Image (cartoon, coloured by chain):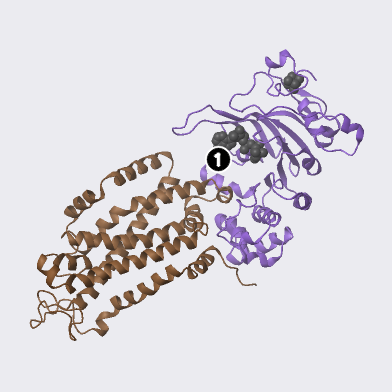
Chain colours: A brown, B purple
Amino acid sequence: MTARSAGPIRRAAQRFAMNRQALLGLAILAPILTCVVTYDLWWGFGPNDIDLLSINRGPTAAHPMGSDGVGRDVLARLMQGGRTSLMVAVISVAISTAIGFLVGAFAAFGGKFADAGLMRFVDLAMTLPPVIFLLVLASIAGTGIGPTIIVIALLSWPVLSRMVRARLLELRERDFVVAAKGMGAGVPHLLLRHGLPNCIDIIVVYATLQVANAILLEAGLSFLGLGIAPPESSWGNMLNAARSGTVLEQYPWQWMFPGGALVVTVLAINFIGDGLRDAFDPRSGLN
Amino acid sequence: MFVDVRNLSKHFAPTGFSRGPTVRAVEDVSFGIPRGKVVGLVGESGSGKTTIGRSVLRLIEPTSGEVRIDGTDIRVLSAAELRKARQRMQYVFQDPYASLSPRMTIGQILTEGMDIQKLGTKADRRRKAAEVLALVEMPEDALNRYPHEFSGGQRQRIGLARALALEPEFIVADEPVSALDVSIQAQVINLMRDLQLRLGLTMLFISHDLAVVEYICDTVVVLYLGRVMEIAPAADLYAHPQHPYTRALLSAIPSPDPEKRKQRQILTGDIPSPSSPPSGCVFRTRCPMAASECAVVNPAMKSAGEGHFYACLRV
Ligand SMILES: Nc1ncnc2c1ncn2[C@@H]1O[C@H](COP(=O)(O)OP(=O)(O)OP(=O)(O)O)[C@@H](O)[C@H]1O
Ligand code: SF4
Ligand SMILES: [Mg+2]
């Protein structure tokens, strides 16, 4: 038996590894992720520990990123907030990816009526102004981690379902899929053996870029007081807590660090997402 | 007849919101294939060959007509029965690049049918894959490679191996060599002929080229605009073509004989659109013998000997 030769996924990974911008994104994101996930192992303060001697203090040796208005350590809240923000983003994207793929698959394989019905529904979901949709959903679902995840997930699947449907409709006519049908394949086989593998590029790129989007959405919702409510911390509600004029001017460390973390993380993920897109579609670099 | 096609028609109606006329791609086509024999389906591009081939295997739903394979009308099978029956009939595609999934290894491609039909164990399937690969004269190390590593001719062999992996009795081969280099065509045709005889396959062999069909087929069906113009045992068709269209096709084959070269008739004009076929005989717009009656009467099949029929009013 000879070794298996490189498949399309492995060749995409090789192209990704040649992409400098994507590698930069990875180099930025990896330490952020590591810190956020492990901070309670190496950092003495918890996100809700109160140090009454240090209220609205700037960076010191004890609190390298300063402290907030009730004496909580900004570094600890930043790490915990990152955990929340990233977790909300990742889970909501996982949900919306699953919904998006399934809706797209049903539309493409479920027959004319399923397709027409689902796509009108998707059109509707996409024409609603996202901000209003978000506010309505959020006011129904309430605040907190669970509701925020649901709101973000429900907002973002239609785009993916459209892309998946288009890809699957095209795939359905391809000879190798007709061949599988000709060998007796039913819809489950067609979806698992051909549909999913041939949508993997769409899904991976969508999911990556959508994580960045979801982080921003969470921040936006929390900033408006509709997302993650204190005392739970997230990057968005840290910014919310720091939005008064006094804090903006006099205690910049309270918004600069979460704001910076947000921007850097989102940028890094976008770099990776773009790199993945180019890796999956080697022609996209040319046009 | 092992395969019996009766009055098969396929009309493509415009779908969804698109407008336009109905395309009458196949109109009232009948032919039969005895067990272990090869019938060739010949016609120009757009004459409905692929549509017939796919309708016969019910890869598309025919508009009307009957297709019996070994006595069963495959149009009335339930979805589950049809899936089971598919094991016995397989399709070989024209385009060797589109017919193999770029994301599967050759091993996965060759075992896919057995996975679908749940035949044997994993090891059995792997063994069968190696076996059919050897049948089409490909090296075994191909199993772990991807389609893009192979040439068109090799891919076409793999497509053939995939069809054979289910041990079918009936194969529809849709222009299996027309996408290949001329130098490769003969090899693949020889291989197919050899396998067909060795495995006793019944085959519907589609081609736009009468010269290719001559070698491999027992009976030839000549198609024009979705209708049968002439149907005859291969030798008879080449020796005594009756229909003006068949004669024109045969005279277009390059021949070393200068006498024959002198008699060459070149077909002029384009094929009419299958959405608005000419009245009467559909070939009349290009027929050198056309007369006024040809625009009025739809020619019925006439006999010209054992198993030899043609549709022309004036021959
Ligand atoms: N899905 C479809 N919808 C509408 N029209 C179709 C469809 N498939 C085929 N046709 C039309 O039916 C006619 C016959 O097509 P078909 O593909 O069967 O021809 P063919 O003989 O196989 O041609 P070729 O040699 O180019 O493969 C053509 O006019 C084609 O445009
Ligand atoms: S019926 Fe008339 S038009 Fe048709 S093939 Fe015969 S002679 Fe030609
Ligand atoms: Mg064709």
Rendered image quadrant of residue B299: top right
Which residue lies under the disc numbered 1? Answer: B77
Please say whether residue B30 is visible from this viewpoint.
Answer: yes
Residue at the location (19% across, 62% down)?
A222
Give the quarter the ligand 3 occupies. Answer: top right
Residue at the location (71% across, 45% down)?
B178
Residue B129 in picture, x, y percent from top left: 65, 61
Residue at the location (34% across, 50% down)?
A158
Instruction: Tell me which chain the residue with mark 1 is part of.
Output: B
Q: Nearer the viewer, residue B133 or B64?
A: B133
Please say whether residue B61 is visible from this viewpoint.
Answer: no
Residue A283 in picture, x, y percent from top left: 52, 57
Q: Vertical placement of B239 versus B35: above or below?
A: above
Q: Vertical placement of A46 versus A12: above or below?
A: below
Residue A137 in picture, x, y percent from top left: 21, 52
Residue B176 in picture, x, y percent from top left: 70, 47
Q: Residue furthest left?
A: A52
Dot 1 lies on which element?
Answer: loop
Location of the N terminus of chain A by quadrant is: bottom right
Q: Residue furthest front?
A: A249
Which amino acid type is marked by label 1?
Answer: Leu
Specify whether A62 is left or right of A12.
left
How would you rate the neighbour count of disc 1 (Cα within 10 Å): few for under 14, some for 14-19, many for 20 or more? Answer: few
